[in-house]
């Protein structure tokens, strides 16, 4: 029973951490904050993020408070899920923080991989869609796709940039798994 509770805690925690990281990604990609999905992300993260913003200011349009919040939540999640006793937390703090940073990076990679898959499916099913979800996915993935498209333009109307970006994300994810 404890194992099930810990797994449920892990998945709920990872979902919320992903939402916090999604808020950072939305700001970095300059996505439309009036989009209904963006509004959900903002409303879901505001209760914990607004008090933290009073202490940690943004810089050049980057919201470092959301990264710090994601890091703190990741650290707490690791401590809770692995049942690390209080006496060992200080001794293993470096390992816990490193694991939390890797967890955050992998979460960001997963968000982008998921968004690229959605973008590809939307391009097959409903190209040129004006659905808020489709527009948000395009806004999020475009900063990753644009540099690849400059190097490798569409060939015969076929855009291979999603495959290249997914491959690069996969390689980065695998390299982090080894570390």
Image: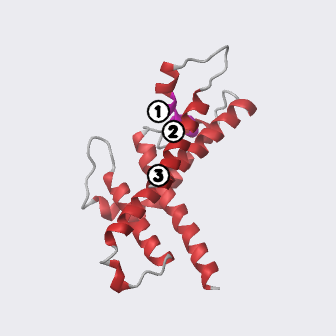
* Quadrant location, the N terminus: bottom right
**Vertical relation: 147 (above or below) 169:** above
Check residue 169 for magenta coloring: no
**Vertical relation: 152 (above or below) 87:** above
Of the residues tagged 2 and 3, which is closer to the observer?
Answer: 3
Of the residues tagged 3 and 1, which is closer to the observer?
Answer: 3
What is the number of the mark on residue 176? 3
Question: In the image, is 79 to the left or to the right of 152?
Answer: left
CA–CA distance between discs 2 and 3?
23 Å
- Please identify the residue farthest to the top as the structure is shown: 156
Q: Nearer the viewer, residue 80 or 133?
A: 80
What is the number of the mark on residue 140? 2
The percent position of residue 13, horizontal first and vertical second, equals 52, 67
Question: Mark 1 or mark 3, which is nearer the start of the sequence?
Answer: 1
Residue at 63% across, 36% down: 119
Magenta extent: 137-145
Question: Mark 3 or mark 2, which is nearer the start of the sequence?
Answer: 2
Main secondary structure type of the part rendered in magenta: helix
CA–CA distance between discs 1 and 2?
7 Å
Question: In the image, is 70 to the left or to the right of 171?
Answer: left
Check residue 140 for magenta coloring: yes
What is the number of the mark on residue 143? 1
Circle 1 packing at 10 Å, graded few (<14), some (14-19), many (20+), is few
């Amino acid at each position: 029973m404890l194992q099930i509770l810990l797994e449920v805690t892990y998945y709920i925690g990872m979902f919320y951490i992903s939402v916090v990281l999604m808020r950072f990604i939305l700001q970095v990609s300059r996505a439309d904050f009036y989009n209904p999905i963006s509004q959900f992300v903002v409303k879901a993260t505001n209760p914990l993020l607004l008090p933290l913003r009073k202490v940690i200011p943004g810089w050049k349009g980057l919201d470092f408070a959301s990264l710090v919040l994601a890091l703190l939540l990741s650290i707490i999640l690791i401590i809770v899920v692995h049942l690390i006793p209080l006496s060992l937390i200080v001794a293993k703090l470096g390992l816990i923080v490193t694991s939390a940073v890797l967890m955050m990076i992998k979460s960001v990679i997963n968000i982008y991989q998921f968004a690229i898959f959605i973008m590809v499916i939307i391009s097959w099913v409903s190209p040129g869609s004006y659905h808020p979800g489709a527009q948000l996915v395009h806004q999020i993935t475009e900063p990753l796709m644009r540099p690849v498209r400059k190097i490798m333009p569409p060939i015969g109307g076929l855009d291979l940039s999603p495959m290249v970006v997914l491959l690069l994300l996969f390689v980065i994810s695998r390299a982090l798994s080894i570390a």
